[in-house]
Amino acid sequence: MSFFKPKHIKEGKMLLKGVRKFVRYNRDLIKPEQGKTIEMVEGEFREKLNDASTSKEDLDKAAHVLTEACEKSVPSYQTSMLKENLEVIFVAVVIAMGIRAYFVQPFKIPTGSMQPTLNGIIAHPHRQAHPVKGEDYTEPGRFGQIWDKMYYGRSYINLVAEEDDTVLLSQMREVKFMGFFPRTEIPCSSGRVYTVAGPKGKVDDLITNAVNRNQVVKKDQAIARGFIDTGDQVLVDKFTYHWKQPTRGEVFVFVTRGIAGIERGFSASQRAGGSQHYIKRLGGVPGDHLKVEPPNLYINGKLAEEEGFQNVMSKKNGYGGYTSGMGYQLEFNLGEEEYVALGDNSGNSYDSRGWGTVPRDNIVGRALYVYLPFGHHWGRIH
């Protein structure tokens, strides 16, 4: 288990993450040749870190070389104030990464697989699009939008054509603003590119009927219209599972690394980006026998008793019961270090029924608390 790795290995991994953040924060200050030096030294450090035969002393020396390469990448004419700020950034990064690595980590619900327990990102389209700007569509004023943002995580979109044009829907693409916030670029045949806040998969849902039909728009005609509610943002407790085994019925987060059934569906860029994080309900623990008989879940021969399972099986308040699907595995005999992950939105959840069990080493922690937005599920997660 990662918690019991040597301290210098953990610190080495934290240093690598800190270096990546340092480079991002100071990209405009670092010259290309200095950036290449940092990449080379970082690669050498990574090799030593992954080599089990590397001693602590050798790793410390490599860490010093890497840190020095970063420090030298800042132009010499910068003031001492900048140097102090850089040191603050390094300290802040180390502290933040330490908290993130061992105690608590924020996580955003990306999909609807856990609804209605937890919300993913939801698009609410307004399909009509008269040629007159705003004729058929109203949205709250500034204060109303601020309230909706805090209460529902809601962003309003009313993208209107600035000229007669043809929208190239097939060339829409998702980009990251500030390396984190999803934006969707919508190009047109004129060369104009509109940018909308939100992931492409959800902005697609807001494209108006007129544009979907023929892609040709007139000036002041709506291209995309409606609003997007962000997914619930939760705090994941990464500490408790170091001292106790995961408990059946808890909502938990895990990485997909090494789970072949999931990774087969990833694109090359997703695989290159490292492990993805999934959030599900922990359906079974080592030694359990599970069987799905829609709409029910049986554990060790008995109807599942935990509150979360009872909610799903009730088929009330938005829950639809446990479902079967073509090719899905509906029965499990769990061995050591094996866990079953099930989505509460069973009919729309790709989970252990489709790709198998979760290894113990993949478990990150339990989902503890929804801290944003305030309107749907704010509070402790059950």
Image: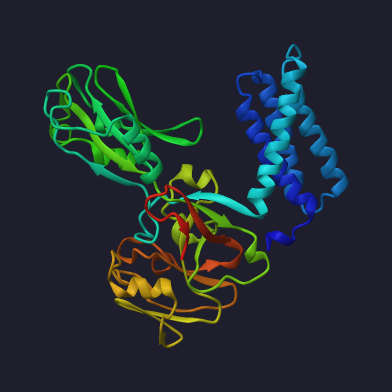
Q: Is residue 237 above or below residue 249?
A: above
- Please state, as top left, top right, bottom left or bottom right, where the N terminus lies in the image: bottom right
Foreground: 244 or 32?
244
Q: Residue furthest bottom?
A: 301
Task: Identify the residue shown where x is 81% and y is 38%.
Answer: 62
What colour scheme governs how the chains and residues are painted in the rendered image of this protein? rainbow
Is 26 on the left or on the right of 221, as rendered? Answer: right
Number of numbered markers: 0
Q: Position of residue 79 (x, y in %)?
A: 75, 14
Task: Identify the residue shown where x is 73% and y is 36%.
Answer: 91
Is 94 on the left or on the right of 24, as rendered? Answer: right
Is 179 on the left or on the right of 323, as rendered? Answer: right
Q: Residue furthest top?
A: 77
Task: Identify the residue shown where x is 70% and y is 22%.
Answer: 34
Q: Quadrant of residue 136?
A: top left
Foreground: 270 or 243?
243
Q: Position of residue 233 (x, y in %)?
A: 46, 49
Q: Position of residue 185 (x, y in %)?
A: 34, 29
Foreground: 125 or 29?
125
Q: Position of residue 146 (x, y in %)?
A: 37, 35
Q: Residue furthest right?
A: 57
Task: Identify the residue shown where x is 32% and y is 35%.
Answer: 144
Q: Is residue 44 above or below residue 315?
A: above
Q: Quadrant of residue 131?
A: top left
Q: Is residue 371 above or below residue 353?
A: above
